């Protein structure tokens, strides 16, 4: 039994709605199931290699807003956001405003979405993505520390190192590109709140997408 299965059983099964689709088990999870760390808590530090071979930590970005984006290039929900350039646009908006954007790949070797350093660099180039860095997490230590369950699964950390948003990228839990029309982008809204110096109004939502392909 993998970690996801164990967690699903612990929450009673009824909190998890699975609907089969391409890319493995895709799921919609209740807020109770997703919250490994609470908003308002200090975000867990980490030390992992990025796709360029540098060691990256959360501490090095203290004083700046940080977005964490769990990704899996084979997941149709991720592809919706990249093939439409929705994710790249959001990355560019954020990083041009001084925000640190960290892609994180927690797929284990042999699992969908796993990439080594060269593969991750090539994927960033192919997608025309603009993250600050792509972090390699094949053991899942970072993903499990944050309770990342789906791809995409988004987190925002304020300059004081406190988690202020976690959940979905938007309010359209679909892999169809047409669902982006009229969608409310929770990450963009949260960053606007932070930029305006106010509390994040929608601080936690239900993530959707493919399950993170952790090592078992």
Image: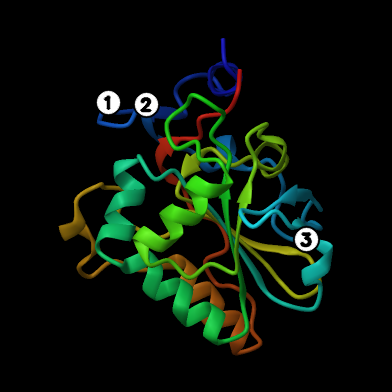
Disc 3/disc 1 C-alpha distance (Å)? 35 Å
Q: In the image shown, does 146 or 201 lie closer to the viewer?
A: 146
Q: Residue furthest front?
A: 118
- Residue 196 bears which disc, if any? none
Q: Is disc 2 placed on a helix, strand or loop?
A: loop
For residue 58, which numbered disc appears in the image? 3
Q: Residue at x 32, y 58 (%)?
A: 81
Q: Are marks 2 and 1 in contact (CB under 8 Å)?
A: yes
Task: Give the label, 3 or 2, closer to the camera.
Answer: 3
Dot 3 surroundings within 10 Å: few (below 14), some, or many (20 or more)? some
Callout 1: few (<14), some (14-19), or many (20+) C-alpha neighbours within 10 Å?
A: few
Residue 20: give its label. Answer: 1
Q: Mark 2 — residue?
A: 25
Determine whether, in the image, residue 98 is placed left or right of residue 21.
Answer: right
Q: Which-is-in-front pick, marks 3 and 1?
A: 3
Residue lying at the far top in this picture: please name it. 1
Find residue 181 and report its image quarter.
bottom left
> Do the residues under discs 3 and 2 have CB atoms within 8 angstroms?
no
Q: Position of residue 40 (x, y in %)?
A: 75, 61
Q: Is residue 202 above or below residue 175?
A: below
Image quarter of the C terminus: top right
- Residue 131, given in percent of the width and then of the height, sits at 53, 67
Separation of disc 2 and disc 1 at Cα?
A: 6 Å
């Amino acid at each position: 039994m993998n970690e996801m299965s164990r967690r699903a059983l612990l929450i009673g099964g009824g909190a998890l709605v699975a609907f089969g689709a391409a890319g493995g088990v895709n799921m919609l999870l209740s807020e109770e199931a997703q919250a490994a760390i609470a908003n308002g808590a200090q975000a867990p530090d980490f030390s992992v290699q990025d796709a360029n071979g540098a060691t990256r930590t959360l501490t090095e970005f203290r004083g700046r807003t940080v977005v964490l984006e769990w990704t899996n290039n084979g997941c149709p929900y991720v592809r919706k956001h990249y093939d439409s350039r929705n994710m790249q646009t959001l990355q560019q908006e954020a990083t041009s405003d001084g925000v640190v954007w960290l892609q994180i790949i927690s797929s284990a070797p042999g699992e969908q979405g796993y990439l080594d350093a060269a593969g991750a660099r090539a994927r960033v180039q192919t997608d025309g993505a603009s993250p600050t860095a792509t972090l390699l997490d094949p053991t899942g230590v970072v993903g499990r520390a944050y309770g990342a369950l789906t791809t995409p699964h988004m987190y925002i950390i304020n300059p004081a190192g406190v988690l202020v948003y976690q959940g979905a990228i938007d309010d359209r839990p679909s892999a169809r590109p047409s669902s982006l029309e009229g969608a409310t982008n929770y990450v963009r809204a949260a960053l606007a709140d932070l930029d305006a110096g106010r509390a994040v109004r929608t601080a936690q939502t239900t993530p959707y997408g493919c399950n993170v392909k952790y090592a078992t």
